[in-house]
Amino acid sequence: MNTKKQNPWKRLLGIRGMGAALTAFAGFIILYVAFGLIEPTVFSGQNIMNLLRSMSKYLLIGIAQSFILITGNIDLSIGSMVGMSAMISATMMAKAFHPAVALLVALLSCLAVGLINGFLVGKFRLPPFIATLGTMFVARGIAYMVNGNRNTDAITTGIGKEAGDAFQNFFYYGSVLKIYNAFWIALIVFVIMFFILSKTRTGRHIYAIGSNIDAAKLSGVNIVATTTKVYLVSAVCSWLVGLILCAQAGMGNMEAGISYEMYGVAAGVIGGVSPLGGTGLLLGTLAGSAVWQTLENGLNMIGAQVGIQRLVIGIIVVCAVLLDVVVRNGQFGRRKKA
């Protein structure tokens, strides 16, 4: 009888990764309040809307990288896929292709990179750092080549102002219930991916591979298929971020997505997703992306230099990884008996 009345907080914290996720949420609240006390306009409705919209990019790439980190791998090609998506879609729209066709070609291109990553890492057992480093350069090369090594013209020059405005409003400037569409897109993806990771067999297989790939294989987990799936998730999220950047600028930029693969790592790791694999919740990634964007937004609002912003965020990422390593090595709460 007493077991059913067990403290719900203990049950909640008993979920692996939940403690880190809740800590990240607490950090987000503390940071937001602190910046708001220094600069009250941080609390304004418009700033909150802008913060959520900007956070959408970090949430999407955080989801992408988190899926892969949980398997014990990494994807360095995320930022280049973002740039490839933005450039392919913008170039085609600027040349009067229907937006649906442009978006489909960009999606297929990103999926092709994700598929290659999955096979190189899952089937051929290439180190993910090397495999995705190669595809990172390939995807960025395509982003440069697709429009002859130059940024695109405005998409409205090809598809017209009405269609161009519709594209930009759908992915960036439009809003529903006073919240920008970019955040709604990221939130929908988050809910879908949260369900997949926490409630499906595929999700269990992802955690199993990250915990012990040999044991997972002996248990009947299809390593190649599962690894490929996580890299395809990464490809879809990168594609969406590319479209958001394209809609934001109204054109394609060859440098779009630079360093976004590291932003994805930061969003996941700050939220408690272990870079060593097998541990982490997408709730933590949501919190991590909120912390990242709040830091960026708050430091901008108080006039901090870009160098200081990167320094602060870098220290937080290193501390988060160091804490994960210390906890995994059992250096908290364990003492060897003499």
Image: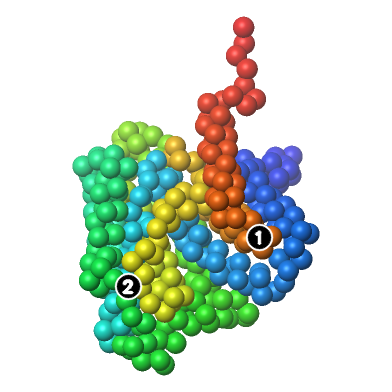
User: Residue placed at 51% from the left, 72% from the top?
Assistant: 182
Locate residue 111, reporting x and y percent: 28, 62
SS for dot 1? loop
Q: Name the foreground residue: 171 vs 220.
A: 171
Question: Left or right: where does residue 145 sit relative to residue 65?
Answer: left
Q: Name the foreground residue: 2 vs 77.
A: 77
Q: Is residue 307 above or below residue 10?
A: below
User: Residue placed at 25% from the left, 68% from the top?
Assistant: 149
Label 1 Cα neighbours within 10 Å, binned few <14 / some 14-19 / many ≥20: few
Quadrant location of the C terminus in the rendered image: top right
Cα–Cα span, label 1 and label 2: 30 Å
Q: Is residue 228 above or below residue 169?
A: above
Mark 1 or 2, nearer chain start:
2
Q: Which residue is mark 2?
A: 151
Q: Which residue is mark 1?
A: 303
**Three-letter code for the amino acid on which mark 2 is drawn:** Asn
**Three-letter code for the amino acid on which mark 1 is drawn:** Gly
In the rendered view, how is the structure colored?
Answer: rainbow
Q: Residue furthest top?
A: 338
